[in-house]
Image (cartoon, grey):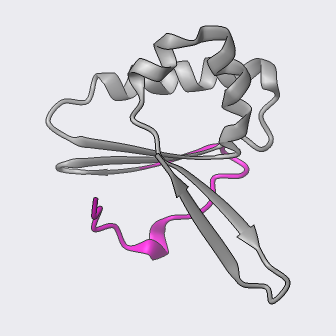
């Protein structure tokens, strides 16, 4: 899916944990769970899911950094999360030549 968003306006939300870009036909959000304590991950993601479920007639895309923190939430709340998201996982590795290798899982 092509989002047509200028990459210069997308920044890591490390300190605010959520950045949003709203366009007429698109809602793009970027969540960084790195600094979020595990006990708050479910609340943040649940609130976000509730917010994006109110969006009508738009494509909604959410990028989540440190998404491995969701694994405990998914174990706890199971099917509700699986049924809500269509997920694509991207693993980023840096090799000895300082090049990035991206592996995409569906």
Question: Is 100 positioned to the left or the right of 59 in the image?
Answer: right
In the image, is 91 to the left or to the right of 28?
right
Q: Is residue 19 magenta?
A: yes
Q: Is residue 44 above or below residue 88?
A: above
Residue 73, by quadrant, is top right
Residue reaching furthest to the left: 57
Query: Image height check: is 51 above or below 89?
Result: above
Q: Residue furthest bottom?
A: 97
Q: Position of residue 44 (x, y in %)?
A: 61, 25
**Foreground of the two, 8 or 76:** 76
Which residue does the image show at 53% across and 19% down from the upper left? 46
Residue nearest the viewer, comparing 92 with 7: 92
Q: Position of residue 2 (x, y in %)?
A: 27, 64
Q: Is residue 28 left or right of residue 2?
A: right
Q: Is residue 49 magenta?
A: no
Q: Which residues are magenta?
A: 1-20
Which secondary structure dominates the residues rendered in magenta? loop
Quadrant showing the N terminus: bottom left
Q: Residue at 80% x, 25% y: name it.
A: 38
Q: Nearer the viewer, residue 105 or 98?
A: 105
Residue 33 image offset from top left, x and y in percent = 70, 40
Q: In the rendered view, tell whether residue 41 sits above or below residue 100.
A: above
Q: Is residue 85 above or below residue 42?
A: below
| Number of marks drawn | 0
Residue appearing at x 20%, y 41% in the figure? 58
Image coords of residue 24 (percent x, y): 18, 50
Q: Quadrant of residue 67?
A: top right
């Amino acid at each position: 899916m092509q989002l047509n968003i200028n990459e210069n306006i997308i920044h890591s939300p490390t300190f605010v944990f959520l950045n949003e870009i709203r366009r007429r036909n698109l809602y793009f959000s970027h969540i960084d769970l790195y600094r979020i304590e595990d006990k708050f991950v479910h609340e943040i993601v649940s609130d976000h899911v509730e917010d994006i479920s109110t969006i009508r007639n738009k494509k909604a895309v959410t990028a989540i950094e440190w998404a491995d923190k969701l694994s405990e939430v998914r174990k706890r709340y199971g099917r509700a999360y699986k049924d809500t998201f269509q997920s694509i996982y991207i693993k980023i590795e840096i090799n000895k030549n300082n090049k990035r290798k991206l592996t995409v899982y569906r």
